[in-house]
Structures are given as C-alpha cells and as structure tokens.
Amino acid sequence: RPEAIAELARTAQAQLRQARRARSSVSKPARAALLHVGQADPVLKAVAAEPMILADGALPDVLAADQRRLVWRALTGRW
C-alpha cells in the first residue's frame, strides 16, 4: 500500500531528525560509522512524496551528492 510506505518513510525521517538532535551523545569513535546516515534523508523524502518509486526501483541516486556532503560531514562531525 503506497500510503503505508509513505508513512514508514515519514516515521524514519522523524527518527533521523531525533537521532541528529542527540548526535552529541555519540562517542567520537562511533561518529565515523554514522557519516553516511545523511544519505538516507533525500531517499526518505522522495519515498514519502512518491511511495511507488520504491516498488518501481526508481529511488534517487544519492551517491554522487553524498560524496560531496561526506567531506562536509567528516569535517563538521554532523550527519
């Protein structure tokens, strides 16, 4: 059901926002493992807006944009 998929994506976005607010509680050694978490946001946003892209295998390609953002996240520690 598309509406269920969209709701799951919105719930995941909310959880990602909550995790980002609590990022200061993550130990420095563990932060490196979370740098790629940022690439989930554009995918979740797209699925929430158009859930059928998941079934169609048409998820946005975030790899190229994520490579640029990864440098910023690595320098700032923000994900």
Image (spheres, grey):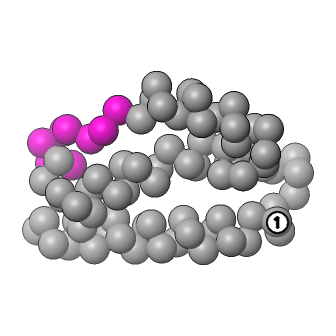
- Residue 29 x, y percent position in the rendering: 87, 47
The outermost residue toward the right is 28
Quadrant (top left/top right/bottom left/bottom right) for the N terminus: bottom left
Displayed quadrant of residue 59: top left
The region drawn magenta spans 54-61
Instruction: Indicate whether 62 appears above or below 35.
Output: above
**Residue 60 lies within the magenta run:** yes
- Residue 63 x, y percent position in the rendering: 46, 29
Displayed quadrant of residue 18: bottom right
Q: Residues within 10 Å of mark 1 (few under 14, many from 20)?
A: few
Q: Mark 1 points at which residue?
A: 24
- Residue 46 x, y percent position in the rendering: 29, 53
Residue at the (73%, 71%) spot, across then down? 22
Q: Mainly helix, strand or loop, the magenta region? A: loop
- Residue 3 x, y percent position in the rendering: 15, 72
Instruction: Indicate whether 36 appears above or below 4.
Output: above
**Residue 13 lies within the magenta run:** no
Residue at the (82%, 66%) spot, across then down? 24
Q: What amino acid does circle 1 point to?
A: Ser
Residue at the (13%, 53%) spot, across then down? 52
Instruction: Indicate whether 46 appears above or below 59.
Output: below
Displayed quadrant of residue 27: bottom right
Residue at the (27%, 63%) spot, across then down? 48
61 with respect to 30 (left or right) = left
72 with respect to 24 (left or right) = left
Q: State the SS at label 1.
A: helix
